[in-house]
Image (spheres, helix red, strand yellow):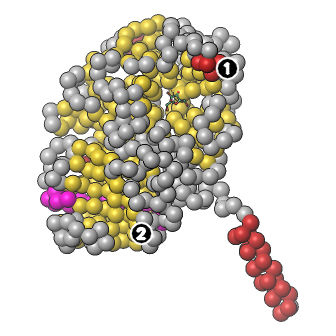
Amino acid sequence: MHITGKLLAVLLAILLETNLQGQSPALYHEPFRPQIHFSPKEKWINDPNGLVFFGGTYHLFFQYYPHDIVWGPMHWGHATSKDRLHWQQQPIALYPDSLGYIFSGCVVVDSNNTSGLGRDGKIPLVAVFTQHDPAGEKNGSNRFQNQSLAYSPDSGVTWIKYQGNPVLKNPGITDFRDPNVFWYLPAKKWVMSLATKDRITFYSSTDLKDWKKESEFGQDAGAHGGVWECPNLFPIAGPGGKLYWALLVSTNPGGPNGGSGTQYFIGEFDGHSFHPSDPKSTTKWLDYGPDDYAGITWDNPHGRRIFIGWMSNWLYANQVPTKTWRNAMTLPRALALRRTEGSLWLVSEPIGNLDHLRKTAIDRSNIRVKASPELSAGYTLHTEGKPYRLHLAMTGDSSFSIVLSNSRGEQVVVGYDKDNHRYYIDRSHSGVTDFNTAFATRPSFAPRIGAYKKVLLTLVVDVSSLELFADGGLTVMSAIFFPEHPFTDLRIVSPRGTTIDNLSYWELRSIW
Ligand code: FRU
């Protein structure tokens, strides 16, 4: 008995050793793998697509290349969830075909079967997406992007391409893509927002197949550092319950901190055209950080608008140092409209049910952070590489920094610079940064919107990302990073000293 026990122990040790040496880390727990954000099991992803809620399930489709960890012939990958936090990856929904790759688009619930694609009284889900023909692009045509349909008779499990594709043909505009469609009830018709090079073109249809051009918006509005992509137009309640319309438009390059970024416009939509409320306002960015692109929202008539974006940037997305998979989505974020500085702004906050992931909590009040310019001084919490959500309330608006670090001296600094009235993220010493010179060369900045006597912020940190929601979500910054070893400490420092009135820290449970 004794000998057998010993033998077993030795065998176990050998087994463990082989496991440690010979095998790759467990799926979803590889180095840099986000623990509270969606990322694919393996291979490449970019934009979220087809966000739809149907039959109690949230769907997230995404730009997917299943054969490599770089961008390639696009498919639509698919994941489903009951809470938009825990995701199950499903079989690929759409494969490229003779009309081209499957670029970004949306999915609608065709409740009245306006498309006629529903059978046996079942409500069809209809995907509207761009087909990008690489051969056409190569041979110099300017009509290589067209809009197509696919439908699912079984709540999103299987997808059938529509025989009459493409349904919206290119009139000769090189960038003609990323349809986003919703049902406009007052006129009982579908409305599509389409990115058409340097503007958004609106189309309408009663059957999703036959599309009529309604209007254009944006040629002389907003930021035009790059081509416009991935529009999303939706109604949103403003102050006093008044209904406004928000139009999200991604642009690449030309983002607020270089490369990719998503701007937005607030205005009115009459079923034909979009009219911004303050056409002269400066460009408003949904996220001033470097890593939030091509995001769109779930159309959920009974709940808050929930946004999700691709947490990367075309500047370096193809080179970030992950090995088996590449790129992740942002946290789902609830959007609201707030008036300040005489203008309407979208505010974002992490989705409400994030608290379901809370594992442990620390609450403190009245913490005095002594004045020190040293980033090694200040108030420290040990985070041990685990994901967390931090809330801070501070009276006064002294400059401060939040430093995420490990014992190797790698760090990411996120903070507020009172003198320049702005927030910033500095990842210049964040670990692996040499895969692309654009990644860490300069800090990212965001203007502080409004004048406040208090600082109220939420910071969500995962293994390789941070998302800052400052001033109740008026200023948002998202950034990814790749420390050689997980960041184990969180320090709050302030050059002139400050008082933290309240600090609430939640360690969050992995979703995998
Ligand atoms: C945005 C984008 C879209 C396009 C897709 C291709 O990131 O360029 O305009 O549909 O990616 O993957």
Disc assigned to residue 161: 1
Query: Which percent across, then down, holds residue 123?
Result: 60, 23
Q: On the rendered structure, is 327 left or right of 488?
A: right
Q: Position of residue 178 (x, y in %)?
A: 50, 24
What is the three-letter code of the residue carrying label 2?
Answer: Gly
The quadrant of the rendering that contains the C terminus is bottom right
Camera sees residue 489: yes
Q: Residues within 10 Å of mark 1 (few under 14, many from 20)?
A: some
Q: How many marks?
A: 2
Q: Is residue 203 above or below residue 124?
A: above
Tell me how far mark 1 sits from mark 2, CA to CA.
53 Å
Snapshot quadrant of residue 21: bottom right
Give the crowd class for mark 2: few <14, some 14-19, many >=20 residues within 10 Å.
few
Q: Secondary structure at mark 2?
A: loop
Asked whether, in this view, residue 425 is left or right of residue 147, the answer is left
Marks 2 and 1: in contact by CB < 8 Å?
no
Residue at the spot 75% in from the left edge and 79% down from the top edge: 13
- Magenta-drawn segment: 385-399
Check if residue 5 falls in the magenta segment: no
Quarter of the image for the N terminus: give it: bottom right
Q: Residue beneath label 2, please?
A: 409
Question: Magenta stretch: residue 386 in it?
Answer: yes
Q: Residue at x 40, y 27 (%)?
A: 226
- Find residue 283 and report its image quarter: top left
Q: Is residue 184 visible?
A: no
Residue 292: x percent and y percent?
Answer: 42, 41
